Structure formats: structure tokens, C-alpha cells
Image (cartoon, rainbow, N blue to C red):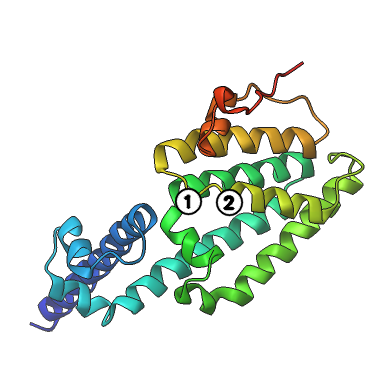
């Protein structure tokens, strides 16, 4: 009898942990795509669970949001530490900037909280400062290794990230091509390396401002 009760208890714990992970995975994808204002009942529907099950694991909507953001912040911290430990500082910096650009496209709702003025992001201010300091160390190391153009400073690299993040408010289909294009252009200006083939077109950038050549926006031509 005792063994059977122990097995049942372990199964319940396993099921509960599975449900919690499922809720977090669905909530992360939902918040990233649709923003943090998405109702808990919609999270439950997408997870295939009852609302009561979600609230059993996360007593309030804010608890669920905080758990999702905490995982996102932890993941970013792990990636920054891995970048600092990478033997090739130039490649590590390139990967860091590329991932930042991808997150502006794929994690729009989460970035609005963590990089914007949303109240939910305030709890992670200290971690964000730590990420910024780690990024500065990575840029300095890349400068010392000659992987960054000589005139590029840490502040210049930070401005590049700010420029990338400024486009996340565009409609999703437009933001994707424009951010990838801009990221490639900024990497070309920051790193001492041959630029990769760049995705998107100059018209994508022009249209992001609501203009095209007919309105006086001149296309940028590559040499």
C-alpha cells in the first residue's frame, strides 16, 4: 500500500510539473506574439487546460507573466556568459547582435516589457544592467582582438542595438525583413569582416517609414 501511494504521489508530481512547463511554454509564445495583455483564459485555451489548472500553478496573471519574463531574462544571461567565454570574440559579438535582432522579431511582446516601460519589466532592472555590462565587456574584448572597427566604441555598439529595437513596433511582417536588413547593415559597420549576403531590400527600409522613392527617399546602393 505504501509503495502504491508513493508511486501515485510521484505521478501526480510529474503530471503537475508537466502541466507547469506546458503552461509556461504556451504563455511564452502567446505573450511574445500578442503581448502581455492576453487574458489567462486564452492561455488556458491554447494550452488545452482549464483556467483553474493555470491558476493552480500561477495564482495570479502577474505571477504567470513574471515567471515567463524570469525565464527569458535567465536565458539571455546564459547566452551572454557563453558569448564572453567564446574563444572568438568577433564571432561571439556577431552572434549576440544577431540574436538580439531575432528577438525583436520573435519576442515582440516580451521585449516591450523588458526593454520598454511596462511595469512588469521593472523587477528585472538589475539583471538587465548585468546584461548590458556583459555586452560592454564583450565589445571591449572584440576591440582588443581587432574584431571590431577601430573607431567603434561600446556606446556605438549600444546605439546599434537601440536602432534595431526601435523597429519592433512595426507590423510583424514588415518588422521581420527590416530588422534583419538593418542588423546586417549594422554588423557590417561594427565588425572587421566581409559582410554576408544581406536579406531584404532597400525598399523595405523606405516603406517602414511610410515612404518610397516616389516620395523622395533615395535608395542606398551597394558598391
Look at the image and tell me whether residue 132 can be seen. yes
- Looking at the image, which residue sits at the far left? 1
Q: Quadrant of residue 218?
A: top right
Residue at image position (36%, 52%) is 33
Q: Mark 1 points at which residue?
A: 169
Q: Disc 1 versus disc 2: distance between alpha carbons?
A: 7 Å
In the image, residue 81 above or below residue 221: below
Q: Position of residue 28 (x, y in %)?
A: 36, 59
Task: Judge by depth and name the residue closer to the eye, 16 or 33.
Answer: 33
In the image, residue 127 above or below residue 135: below
Q: How busy is the neighbourhood of tag 2: few (under 14 within 10 Å), some, or many (20 plus)?
A: few
Q: Is mark 2 on a helix, strand or loop?
A: loop
Image quadrant where one finds the C terminus = top right
Residue at image position (46%, 65%) is 71
Q: In which quarter of the image is residue 154?
A: bottom right
Residue at image position (62%, 27%) is 216
Q: Is mark 1 on a helix, strand or loop?
A: loop
Q: Name the residue under label 2.
A: 166
Tags 1 and 2 in contact by the CB under 8 Å rule?
Answer: yes
Task: Judge by depth and name the residue closer to the eye, 212 or 25.
Answer: 212
Amino acid at each position: 500500500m505504501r509503495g502504491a501511494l508513493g508511486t501515485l504521489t510521484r505521478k501526480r508530481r510529474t503530471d503537475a510539473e508537466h502541466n507547469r512547463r506546458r503552461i509556461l511554454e504556451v504563455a511564452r509564445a502567446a505573450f511574445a506574439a500578442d503581448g502581455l495583455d492576453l487574458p489567462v483564459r486564452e492561455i488556458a485555451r491554447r494550452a488545452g487546460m482549464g483556467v483553474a489548472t493555470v491558476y493552480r500553478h500561477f495564482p495570479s496573471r502577474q505571477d504567470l507573466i513574471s515567471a515567463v519574463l524570469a525565464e527569458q531574462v535567465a536565458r539571455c544571461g546564459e547566452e551572454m556568459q557563453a558569448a564572453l567565454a567564446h574563444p572568438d570574440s568577433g564571432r561571439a559579438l556577431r552572434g549576440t547582435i544577431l540574436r538580439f535582432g531575432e528577438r525583436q522579431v520573435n519576442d515582440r511582446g516580451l521585449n516591450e516589457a523588458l526593454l520598454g516601460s511596462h511595469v512588469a519589466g521593472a523587477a528585472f532592472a538589475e539583471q538587465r544592467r548585468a546584461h548590458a555590462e556583459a555586452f560592454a565587456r564583450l565589445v571591449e574584448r572584440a576591440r582588443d582582438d581587432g574584431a571590431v572597427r577601430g573607431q567603434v566604441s561600446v556606446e556605438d555598439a549600444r546605439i546599434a542595438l537601440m536602432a534595431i529595437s526601435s523597429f519592433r513596433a512595426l507590423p510583424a511582417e514588415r518588422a521581420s525583413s527590416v530588422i534583419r536588413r538593418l542588423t546586417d547593415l549594422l554588423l557590417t559597420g561594427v565588425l572587421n569582416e566581409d559582410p554576408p549576403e544581406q536579406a531584404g531590400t532597400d525598399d523595405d527600409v523606405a516603406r517602414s517609414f511610410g515612404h518610397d522613392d516616389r516620395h523622395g527617399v533615395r535608395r542606398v546602393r551597394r558598391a
